[in-house]
Amino acid sequence: MITEEQASQAVAEILSSHKKERKNLIPLLQEVQTSLGYLPEEAMQKIAGFLEMPAVEVWGVATFYNQFRFVPLGKYHTVVCMGTACHLAGGRLILEALERELDIKVGETDEDDNFSLERVACIGCCMLAPVIVIKDKIHPKLTPFKVEEALIPYKQEAQSEES
């Protein structure tokens, strides 16, 4: 995990590379998220101060676009495809199984920062539906029963790192 001091320094460096113009709001939000992995409240407040605009406007823009995250991703970020093919092949059941197995909801990260869960409109693997991606590895043709099986190596790795 990145420390608060490191995050503050990263935000300061990003701000110093931009002009104080409102049109830079989205690029600033994107760069901060790329650097930190998400948009902490403190970073959005610094952006607001830098652009001399109310923090609520920065928050409004950030929450409008679904590309922005407000919690850090887990080490094993899990993405569930909910595109048409995956949805018709049981994507909703896969998502529900993941929520049960990980004990988190979409948009959340578990308390150990190991797993986070996100749903997306399409991954682009329609022939393999339903699909999830865990830490950039595609898991195709899932069933709710196969979800538990797909998670085993990641849970084991997380457990061995904690020991």
Image (cartoon, rainbow, N blue to C red):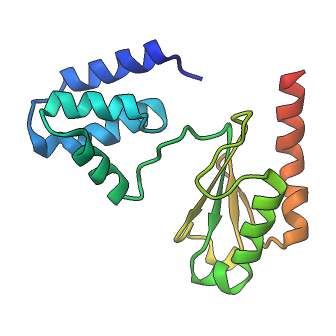
Can I make out residue 57 in this image?
A: yes
User: Front-most of 136 and 23?
Assistant: 23
Name the residue rendered at 25%, 39% in the picture.
55
Residue 53 image offset from top left, x and y in percent: 14, 38
Report the label total: 0
Q: Quadrant of residue 23?
A: top left
Name the residue rendered at 59%, 41% in the picture.
73
User: Front-most of 20 and 89?
Assistant: 20
Q: Is residue 129 above or below residue 147?
A: below
Q: Is residue 21 left or right of residue 88?
A: left
Q: Is residue 121 left or right of residue 21?
A: right
Name the residue rendered at 88%, 32% in the picture.
159
Can I make out residue 129 in this image?
A: no
Image quarter where the C terminus lies is top right
Q: Is residue 92 above or below residue 80?
A: below
User: Front-most of 52 and 66?
Assistant: 52
Residue 103 image offset from top left, x and y in percent: 78, 52
Name the residue rendered at 91%, 68% in the picture.
145
Q: Quadrant of residue 76?
A: top right
Residue 136 image offset from top left, x and y in percent: 64, 49
Residue 109 image offset from top left, x and y in percent: 65, 44
Image quarter where the N terminus lies is top right
